[in-house]
DNA sequence: TATTTTACCTGAGGGC
DNA sequence: TGCCCTCAGGTAAAAT
């Protein structure tokens, strides 16, 4: 499940391969992979072919490749199961391959970027770059104060140097919803998904259904610190892979699944107190927590 | 306006 | 062996 650390691993892997590279060919096998694109496959092809990428940027779970000379970028969202794979030119088709970009890079020569996606929740798009609301850089990997239009409504992520911690705290404490729902709200803070929400709440000893507005300012700050800590640790370990759904640009899995303390560990002892971790249904997904360390207030 | 629910999608795995 | 059912969850549109 690609969340911030997984998407960052992909961005970092893509950056050296695409920066300065020119698109020499586009193959759209499945137009469902263009649900975020305004236009059909041939429009996508015509807009992208011949263009040169100048970098690879990311905010939260969105990543984009700015295009040279225009206020446009190739926008990428991996959804649940999307992969961006670097392959040799003419490489055999990948399972669930949806779109292929042929690239010529002045240093690396020819290569292919394959977008593969089992569940088709992910998609690519050509999107217009718009100024950031605060004038700071759009996200990781770029100095330009712009973001794709479809990313403009998303908050900065907790690892972004321009992330405003006090604004986050104030926003959280105005919400009546459960704190886990607020953590998953990408307009409050981006990049956090079900896995890291559960991990951060466990680390901060906060029950996922605690009303956000009932948290003290100190508790919100502690939670933010734990969110950052878990995202940074996962990033250092290459992200979380449960199955073949998340891999880096070379198709390799991450190691953070071995470091999970709550997510997916129902019935297993809490690493802190030994009480079995509980799994409950929450927002049509699983919520994992320690019923002893994370008491509902 | 703010918040919550639903639709989208495919493959793995369990039950029979 | 094979069919049916459930589950996984990020985003945006729809509903409350």
Image (cartoon, coloured by chain):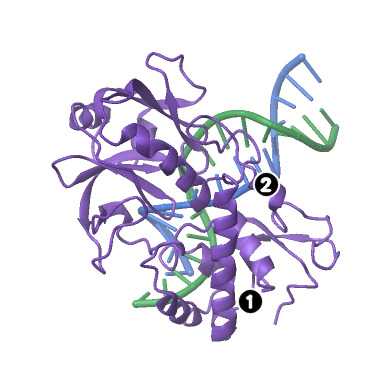
Chain colours: A purple, B green, C blue
Q: Which mark is residue A23?
A: none
Q: From this viewpoint, which residue is outermost toward the front?
A: A107
Marked residue nearer the N-terminal end (1 or 2): 1
Q: Chain of mark 1?
A: A
Give above or below for A188 relative to A194: below
Return the x and y of residue A258 as percentages of the image width and height.
71, 47
Query: A222 and A82: which one is in front?
Result: A222
Query: A196 and A36: which one is in front?
Result: A196
Q: Quadrant of the N terminus of chain A?
A: top right
Residue A3 visible at all: no
Please tell me which residue is depicted at 45% across the width and 25% down the height of the picture. Answer: A97
Q: Give the residue at mark 1.
A: A210
Q: Badge 2, how many Cα within 10 Å: few under 14, some, many 20+?
A: some
Return the x and y of residue A23 as percentages of the image width and height.
25, 27
Return the x and y of residue A121 as percentages of the image width and height.
46, 41
Q: From this viewpoint, which residue is outermost toward the left?
A: A69
Return the x and y of residue A113 as percentages of the image width and height.
38, 27
Instruction: Give the Cα distance between marks 1 and 2.
Output: 26 Å
Give the number of callouts: 2
Please tell me which residue is depicted at 65% across the width and 61% down the height of the picture. Answer: A199
Q: Give the residue at mark 2.
A: A257
Q: Chain of mark 2?
A: A
Q: Quadrant of the C terminus of chain A?
A: bottom right
Tell me the SS state at disc 1. loop
Q: Quadrant of residue A296?
A: bottom right
Give above or below for A25 relative to A67: above
Please tell me which residue is depicted at 72% across the width and 58% down the height of the picture. Answer: A262
Same chain check for tags 1 and 2: yes
Q: Quadrant of residue A210?
A: bottom right
């Amino acid at each position: 499940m690609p969340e911030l650390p997984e998407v960052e691993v992909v961005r970092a892997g893509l950056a050296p391969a695409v920066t300065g590279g020119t698109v020499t060919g586009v193959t759209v096998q499945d137009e469902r992979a263009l649900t975020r694109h305004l236009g059909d496959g041939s429009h996508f092809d015509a807009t992208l072919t011949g263009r040169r990428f100048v970098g690879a940027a990311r905010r939260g779970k969105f990543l984009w490749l700015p295009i040279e000379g225009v206020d446009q970028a190739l926008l990428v969202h991996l959804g649940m199961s999307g992969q961006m794979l670097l392959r040799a030119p003419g490489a055999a088709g990948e399972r669930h391959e949806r779109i292929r970009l042929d690239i010529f890079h002045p240093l690396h020569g020819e290569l292919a970027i394959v977008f593969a996606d089992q569940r088709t929740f992910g998609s690519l798009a050509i999107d217009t770059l718009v100024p950031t609301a605060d004038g700071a850089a759009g996200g990781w990997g770029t100095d330009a104060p712009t973001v794709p239009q479809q990313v403009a409504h998303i908050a900065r992520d907790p690892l972004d140097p321009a992330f405003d911690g006090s604004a986050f705290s104030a926003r959280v404490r105005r919400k009546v919803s459960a704190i886990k729902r607020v953590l998953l709200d990408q307009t409050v803070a981006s990049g956090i998904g079900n896995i890291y929400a559960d991990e951060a709440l466990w680390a901060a000893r906060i029950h996922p259904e605690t009303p956000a507005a009932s948290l003290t300012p100190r508790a919100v700050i502690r939670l933010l610190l734990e969110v950052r800590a878990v995202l940074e640790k996962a990033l250092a370990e290459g992200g979380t892979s449960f199955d073949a759904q998340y891999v880096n640009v070379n198709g390799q899995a991450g190691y953070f699944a071995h470091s999970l303390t709550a997510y997916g560990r129902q019935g297993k002892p809490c690493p802190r107190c030994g009480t079995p971790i509980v799994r409950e249904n929450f927002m049509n997904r699983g919520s994992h927590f320690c019923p002893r360390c994370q008491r509902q207030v």
